[in-house]
Image (tube, grey):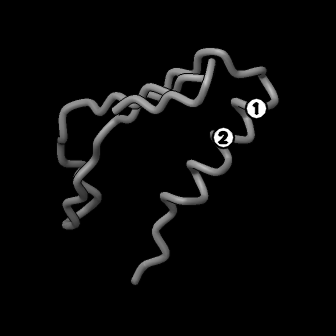
Amino acid sequence: MTRIDGEKRLEITLGPERTRQIGRLSVPVTDVRLEFSGYTEAEAEDALKLFDRMFQKGGG
């Protein structure tokens, strides 16, 4: 997935899905890579904080 906003570009790449075993619990896991182009360091940090907030799971 790629998002382009003027000169800014955010590319999101998903790795293969795998399963993490925690005791008797199996949890699906996928690595996510975010690549920022045209962002200042502060803008990239803000975008990453927003991304983290939007994808938090609250157990319900």
- Residue at x 24% of width, y 58% of height: 27
- Residue at x 29% of width, y 41% of height: 30
- Residue at x 28% of width, y 47% of height: 29
- Residue at x 73% of width, y 34% of height: 45
Which quarter of the rendering shows the C terminus? bottom left
Instruction: Residue 43: give its label.
Output: 1
Which quarter of the rendering shows the N terminus? top left
Q: Is residue 2 left or right of residue 10?
A: left
Amino acid identity at mark 1? Glu
Q: Can you give x and y, in whole percent of width and height, for residue 35 in the image?
A: 51, 21
Q: Is residue 51 depicted above or below 22 in this figure?
A: above
**Residue placed under numbered mark 2 in the picture:** 47
Label 2: which secondary element: helix
Find the residue positioned furthest to the front.
6
How many numbered marks appear?
Answer: 2
Label 1: which secondary element: helix
Amino acid identity at mark 2? Ala
Q: Is residue 57 left or right of residue 25?
A: right
Distance from the alpha carbon under mark 2 to that under mark 1 = 6 Å
Q: Is residue 58 left or right of residue 37?
A: left
Q: Can you give x and y, in whole percent of width and height, for residue 44 in the image?
A: 69, 30
The quarter holding residue 12 reads: top left
* Residue nearer the viewer, 15 or 54: 54
Q: Are marks 2 and 1 in contact (CB under 8 Å)?
A: yes
